[in-house]
Image (cartoon, rainbow, N blue to C red):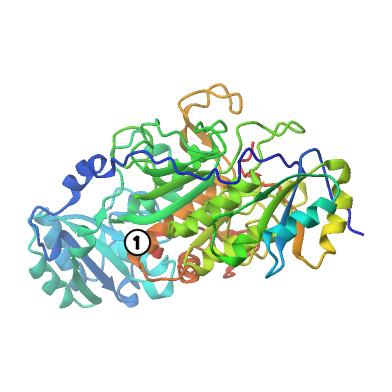
Amino acid sequence: MPAKKSSQSVKSVKSSKPSRSRSASFAEIEANTQPKASRQEFLPGVLVVRCKDDLVNDVPDVARARVASVASFRLPEAAESPFDFLRRNNLLREVVPVFSRMMAGRALGAAPRSAAAAFSLSVRDSENEDLRGINVLKLARSADLKQIEKDLNATPGIEYAHLVPARWLSASAQPATSDKFLKDQWGLKAIGWTTLGMLPDASQVKVGVLDTGVDLTHPDLKNVVSSYVHDGAGATDIVGHGSHVSGIIAAEINNKIGIAGICKCDLMVWKIFGDAPDPSDGQFYVDEVMYQRALNAARQAGVKVVNLSIGGTGRNQTEELLINRLFDAGTLVVAAMGNEFQRGNPKEFPGGFPNVFAVGATTQNNQRASFSNTGSHIAIAAPGHKILSTLPLQPSIARGSNEVEYAKWSGTSMATPHVTAAAALVFAKNPNLTPKQVGDKLKAAAAKLPAMNGKKTTPELGAGLLNLTAALS
Amino acid sequence: MATVQSTPGVQFNLKLAAGVKHRKLNQMLADAPGIESVIQTFPDEADDELSRLYVLEVSAAQADAAMNLLRHRPEVEYVEPTASRRPMRKR
């Protein structure tokens, strides 16, 4: 076990805090997404509609249909009538089966306005019994929502229709639309981020990244990191790992460059690595003193979610003590399962501690990544293969020569921040939840993957694939 | 007797037993072989438990002897080798 000397002195803990410019950087987003009227009661152009199961009895199963045929699907006449009216008057933009496990856009193909197809998906393909039949109608802003709500509530087969309270909007930003590489962020699609109607504002939720540091000059990170503590080492993120993890969580959204992070949160970064690799094997290892102090500082700072994209097989009582302190203080600690499945699949820590939410990695095909460790302690799985995120602008001997600005990396390290950011969003919506409740919510909402063979949890994928849509419902 | 997996620059985590003062640690470490430095992890911490946490740097050659001496001292709640942690990026 390599262990290196700490470069810290006993009283070296000071904070290095760059000025915050969050409000300015998000001004444009907020201007674009906030309602024009200051006290709008309901969201314009949006209705929630829940259909009864038997409404789609005679509608074909979308999952088994040819894409070209989906547009011709029809509900029984009495139920189809109000939607026909909306289409004829060019008021209906889209019907979204919110909790369908399939990617709704992909499944519906060129038929986004087909209520029959969307309702069929929402009933037959719902990820959760309790959420079956729920759809969102996106309508023209000029639509008379109250009349449409009334008409739908009088329609056979519709359980209810209702307006969406505008308080959601007042605390939300829409998911990104302008980030240049968004299309390459397959992980965001896999967890349902790109189809979220609204993104909860987590700017008051403190998220701690304990890692190799962060590049504060990166254009996608410079406005989102609220504090960076690197005492005992230089500010440079030599390895780039912390910058990559930070970008997955919180890269600036809708700034027309680079990638989109999953949440807009209060991102605090602690560097817990030294600046030189271990001479015995050339690897970078956590500095014990920096790490322990960062765990305690995160608790003292009131961090709600801590991201630990690190691991190792040794168990450590002091580390567990400090993590338990965080848990008791209301912090969800999220950690990587490890990447050594093909090398004995050892139990790794901190992911293996009881009060840690351990994350495995999946591929774009929604399968466990071949390297991702398994075990009964896994909580959930998230995208962790070829994940595009931010890297320091300056090259480093610790990375490939082309690995600057952005790169696709793999590992349970990359899966973990997906879950961290999701937890921050859940905390944003439910500030009084305990870390266990947030973890339970993420697990209950997870999408069951085919490899789970109908089981609620498996050692390979935990409770299933992270599903933001359901977790935020 | 447990064997400590040690390499140059080995570190131990040590937690003093409840009620044991810092000066007692200094006396104890004077008797232990190979101790190169002692870092109190939270020197300004008012919390009693956290104030009893230390990271020791020990010469590799004498790590086993130091560990065995320290883990049998009543003033020590536990002493353990630090566990290595590295980034979980798959290359």
Where disc 1 sits, the SS reads helix
Residue in view at x 61 percent, y 42 percent: A9
The numbered mark 1 sits on a residue in which chain? A
In the figure, is residue A112 to the left or right of A190? left
Residue A351 drawn at (x, y percent) = 62, 57
Residue in view at x 59 percent, y 69 percent: A455
The one nearer the camera, A180 or A36, is A36
Residue in view at x 35 percent, y 42 percent: A224
Residue at the outermost right position: B1
In the figure, is residue A161 to the left or right of B49? left
Q: Disc 1 marks which residue?
A: A428
The one nearer the camera, A467 or A427, is A427
In this rendering, is residue A198 above or below A178? Answer: below
Residue A386 drawn at (x, y percent) = 54, 39
How many numbered badges does the structure rendering display? Answer: 1
In the figure, residue A32 lies in which quadrant?
A: top left
Question: Can the viewer see residue A378 in this picture?
Answer: no
Residue in view at x 26 percent, y 68 percent: A75
In the figure, is residue A44 to the left or right of A411? left
In this rendering, is residue A161 above or below A62? Answer: below
